[in-house]
Image (spheres, rainbow, N blue to C red):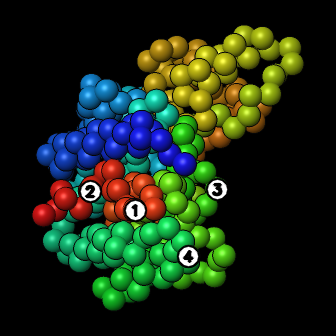
Amino acid sequence: MLTEDEIKKYLKAGEIVHHALNMALDIVEEGKSLLDIAEKLENDIINRGGKLAFPANISINHIAAHYSPSVNDDKVIPRESIVKVDLGAHVDGYIADAAITISFNPEYEKLLTASRYALRNAERVIRPGKNLGVIGEVIEKTILKFGFKPIANLNGHKIERFSLHAGKSVPNTSVFTFKKIGSHEVYAIEPFATDGEGYVIEGESGHIYQIITMRRIKGYKDLDRFLKDIWREYRSLPFSERWIYKKYGEEGLNKLNDLREYKRTYLYHLLMDEAGGMVSQFEDTVIVTEKEVLITTNVLELYR
């Protein structure tokens, strides 16, 4: 059972992410630096009283997820591209996760509409006791009506305090499952639509890390201390190598690589449509109670 105070913190985090995504609509432009955009959005979250639940993801064209600019990243927004901006904030561990897609090519507006309408239709049927497979069916049918495919191996997810992926998944296709939405649960709903295969594969590094275990590394006290420092700052939430570099410099990046070698951290890789198709995404965080569904991030309001 979520307390009133916990719900307020979820709602505050949602307001912060909503504001940052609204800012993204203004600052994401062709030719602009991805690094500059990411840092402006992350700073906006911090300046409004939130903490970062994960690094700003700016995933372009066929890349569906997990690209966040690296240290000294020189990439820019390409001409006639479609850009997915996925942001996360938390207030005392209570997370909001949301995404929008921005198009610089009129040819792909219908693709954006497909995932946006899929999110809208999914939100209309969410309630306690609803089978999660039904949510996936609604998303899939909506996207198919527009002539595109949902991405079958990307899902929404249950959220808990300091946990982005808390067990239950919200499918983007019609699947058989016994799992249902419970009362006083929080979910990220994130339909992905593509004109490609509808299945993602891994690519190169996305420059995002996550601690997966706090087991001691025998004989390496300095590395253990470094791991504990990172845990105190981020817990099990994803973080950027940029943030490590800003605080610890080149030595911090070397230690981060060592932690990965010792399997204490996980390095996220890009997720890309298998056939190289264009991908759109829209995402909201919702709180489900007995009486109502509270949409904390309200990304669809940005398009009214």
Identified at 41% across, 41% down, the residue is 4
Of helix, strand and loop, which one carries label 3?
loop
Q: CA distance from mark 2 to mark 3?
A: 24 Å
In contact (CB < 8 Å): disc 2 and disc 1? no
User: Is 98 rendered above or below residue 42?
Assistant: below
Identified at 52% across, 14% down, the residue is 248
Q: Which residue is mark 3?
A: 167
| Mark 4 residue crowding within 10 angstroms, few (<14) / some (14–19) / many (20+) | some
Q: Which residue is mark 1?
A: 291
| Mark 3 residue crowding within 10 angstroms, few (<14) / some (14–19) / many (20+) | few
Residue at the extreme right of the image, as rendered: 218
Tell me which amino acid carries mark 4.
Asn
| Mark 2 residue crowding within 10 angstroms, few (<14) / some (14–19) / many (20+) | many
Q: Name the residue nearer the viewer: 181 or 301.
A: 181
Please tell me which of labels 2 and 4 falls first in the chain.
4
User: Is 51 rendered above or below residue 7?
Assistant: above
Q: CA distance from mark 4 to mark 3?
A: 15 Å
Of helix, strand and loop, which one carries label 2?
helix
Please tell me which of labels 3 and 1 falls first in the chain.
3
Q: Name the residue nearer the viewer: 62 or 49.
A: 49
Q: CA distance from mark 3 to mark 1?
A: 24 Å
| Mark 1 residue crowding within 10 angstroms, few (<14) / some (14–19) / many (20+) | few
Q: Considering the image in quadrants, where does the C terminus appear?
A: bottom left
